[in-house]
Amino acid sequence: MSPIPLSLATFFSTLCGGLFALKFNDRLHFILSFTAGVLLGVVAFDLLPEIFSIAHEHNYDPSGAMTTLVLGFLVFHAFEKFFIVHMVHDKDYTGGHRHPKIGVLSALALTGHSFMDGVGIGLGFQVSPAVGTVVALAVIAHDFCDGLNTVGLMLVNRNTKRRAFHLLLADAAAPVVGAAVSYAIKVPPEMLMLYLGFFAGFLLYIGAADVLPEAHSRSKPGMTAGLIVLTCLGAEFIGLVVRLIG
């Protein structure tokens, strides 16, 4: 397996997420709950063990990777708050705040973010095929949400469905381009360890501070226990994948 075929899977994941947002928005909380578990599972069962494995093999201090993990969490937190790149609730916007240009700029920010997802898959494969595959699975799950976000941000800011679909296609293609670019990037083991820490912080933020709260905010009363079970199943799914391909 190589980065390009898996990045193509992210293309279809993003596309499906956007189309789902157009048609089945009322069932989104189930998918988001499972996705949050997938993202947290990648951090716990794949990225962190790989960081400590690289540190042990090359006699590096892993504290640097833990620093970049915190940095990754905080950078994406700030990015989201300042540029509004993730899911937006209709209730957070009054009529004066909605504008097509805001939707386009937000969708373009998501496209740049998706490009970095593709680069992340390629760098994961530089560590090992197992790490690259698991990182790709996390990105595939996350990019489904990116497709949802792209369409949602466009529509909530009064863009047409046609324009929303065009931005969805750009967001879907971005990881493929990022994975191709990663072939030109050669990173030494110590920098890979730091990058994995940063990427883990990013996934931790997306899963725990973004996707999971969004899932519960969309659910109906009495569904909390079921959504928690889905999150646990998502994390366990990644644990099983890591054990099978590790």
Image (cartoon, helix red, strand yellow):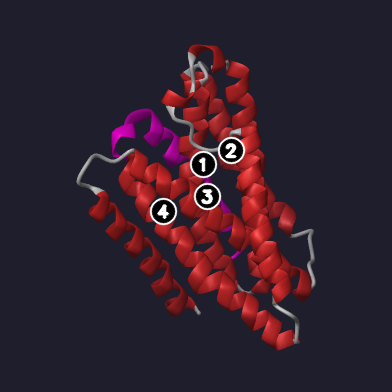
**Which tag, 3 or 2, sits closer to the chain's start?**
3
Per the rendering, the mark at residue 35 is 4
Camera-near label (1 vs 3) is 1
Asked whether the residues under the numbered discs 3 and 2 touch, taking CB atoms below 8 Å apart as contact, a structural biologist would say no
- Would you call the spot at circle 2 few (<14 residues within 10 Å), some (14-19), or many (20 or more)? many
Q: CA distance from mark 4 to mark 3?
A: 14 Å
Q: Quadrant of the N terminus?
A: bottom right
Q: Quadrant of residue 196?
A: bottom right
| Residue at the extreme left | 222
Residue, disc 1: 146
**Which tag, 2 or 1, sits closer to the chain's start?**
1
Q: Amino acid at mark 2?
A: Asp
Residue at the (53%, 38%) spot, across then down: 86
Residue, disc 2: 171
Magenta segment boundaries in residue numbering: 1-27
* Relative image position of residue 43 (x, y in whole percent): 53, 66
Asked whether the residues under the numbered discs 2 and 1 touch, taking CB atoms below 8 Å apart as contact, a structural biologist would say yes
**Which tag, 4 or 3, sits closer to the chain's start?**
3
